[in-house]
Amino acid sequence: MEQDVVNVDVLIVGTGASGMAAAVTAKAQGLKVLVVEKEALYGGTTARSGGWLWIPGTRLATEQGIEEPAGAATAYMRHEATTHYDEKRVDAFLKHGPEAIEFFTRNTCVQFDMPAVFPDYHAEAPGGQPGGRSMVTRPFDGRELGARVKQLAPPLPELTVFGMMLGSGPEIKHFMRTFKSFTSFVYVTKRLSRHFLDVLRFGRGMTLTNGNALAGRLAKAGMDLDVPVWLSSPVRQLIVEQDRVTGAVVQHEGKTLRVLASQAVVLACGGFPYDVARRKQLFPHAPTGHEHYSPSPSTNTGDGLRLAEAVGGHVDGTIPHAAAWVPTSVTRRKDGSPGVMPHFIDRAKPGVIAVTTQGKRFTNEGNSYHDFVQDMVKACEGQGEVTAWLLCDHKVLRNYGLGCVAPAPLPIGRHLRSGYLKRGATWAELAREIDVPAATLERTVEAFNADAARGVDNAFGKGSKAYNRYQGDALVTPNPCLAPLEQGPFYAIKLVVGDIGTFAGLVTNEHAQVLDDDRQPIAGLYAVGNDAASVMGGNYPGAGITLGPALTFGYVAGMHIAAARRQAGEHDADALRVVPSREKTLEVA
């Protein structure tokens, strides 16, 4: 049968940060690029993320007056990655990460802000730093995208207020202090007014923040370079000619097309959070593959991994943690569909503790989400379900909120009626509601309260680490993470295991090339983002350790492909543009 053929230099599969970074970089180097996306919307997991990037040694840090000791970042990553420390990949990340930030911030609309203080998650470890490595995407006006803003994937509903994305850090603090500070009240009033006006006019808020801002900015950078993006266009298989990946079979607008890529195919499909079979294989807490909850897009089903495996690539299943774990709670949205709420910062607030189904605390609640889940899994060993309960009293709930439950003055009735939020007038009553031993729970709270009153957590050290204190409440002394749970009624939310991205990905080298079983590059094939094995070795050193490497290795892939093209010369590159005699050729803008 006659098939349509499209000729490009580079085919990129996926529209998250890594894919779009590769696309913008390659196009800026003069290559003909096509991006395909299986979803009807673009942005992938990036659009739902916090929009933070962890990249040491950038100009943004220097501008904050932060100068790292020589070798500190290398030492930290060696400490974090342990047995899966890949020296060449780590060196490439630390070298090219600052270059990538310079490239994007100097040449495109992709911009970032770096707080003066945002600690590494293990700042006390060798090479750890109190700040200067984590940056957040600068808010972006969605109107810059024109009509294409309607195709931008929305943020995770559970992380919005009235459908509005909140910027990280100062903006969240304003919303928590709306009725405690006149300045905050004015800020929140203006922010909400602008949002509601945008919704009336455009159908959605136009002040994009966090990961939605990053997805929007990268899309705009691609638009400015005329990079074509095909939505609703899944890749069915890779094309291999003479031991080289030369393109892919793509479903697009009702047709099956052969997209021939003279230089490379870049896989950026978002990992495998919804591949049940691979979850069963790699997630110890999910013996059937179903005992897991992810806020990632449900279409992230491991396409990139399977495509690469079919041509000789392989997934590193030995990585200590196959995903970036996060404690989650499962709620019910207004339309009846389930929602997954990641618990990033509420656990660190003063007056919040977590207990097992036996009513006992098991960890420092202020630690990173990845570390928290590891301790939760250990505490539930031998049980049928890996779960815990997050607890607080009435004052804390109304001051800070908990999970999907927003702070005052927003009502809590809907969450009580749905069963998402459990309530008891006393600890014994709450214990009955959540089916934990009442006497044990009361002893746990009594011991915690005695310590909290003195500002020291003798059991687990909550508030003893820089990251704990950053996520606590600086207005609470002497420990910003501790306060007694005394004012009833008392509340609980059930926690289960989720992820914010998978770590076990394709084995790649320092150029982002996919390697075969002999650790040799598969010609013409690259993998970036969550399709590549984590350069962090399955650990989570700081805010943005998925997006930082995603942007960096997207840039690395684009630059490496362009360099190879220059080295080969136009004649050799053109020779790869093979079009079977019975096929007709289409042009891509």
Image (cartoon, helix red, strand yellow):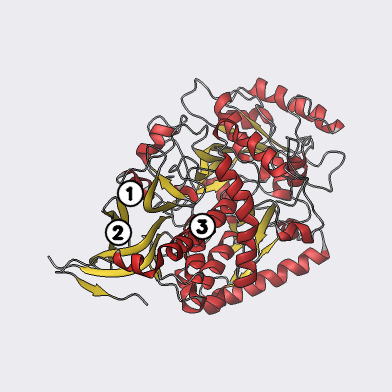
Can you name the residue that lies furthest to the left here?
1
**Where does the image place residue 259, in percent across and percent down from the top left?**
29, 64
Mark-to-mark CA distance, 3 and 1? 18 Å
Q: Is residue 132 left or right of residue 331?
A: right
Q: Earlier in the sequence, mark 2 or mark 3?
A: 2
Q: Is residue 546 left or right of residue 300?
A: right
Residue at the disc numbered 2: 248
For label 1, count other residues whose C-alpha is less than 10 Å away and answer few (under 14), some (14-19) or many (20+). some
On residue 307, which mark appears?
1
Quarter location, residue 200: bottom right
Residue at the disc numbered 3: 554
**Where does the image place residue 270, in percent across and percent down from the top left?**
45, 51
Residue displayed at 69% across by 41% down: 121
Q: Is residue 412 above or below residue 478?
A: below
Q: Is residue 130 above or below residue 496?
A: below
**Where does the image place residue 531, in percent across and percent down from the top left?**
44, 48
Q: Earlier in the sequence, mark 2 or mark 1?
A: 2
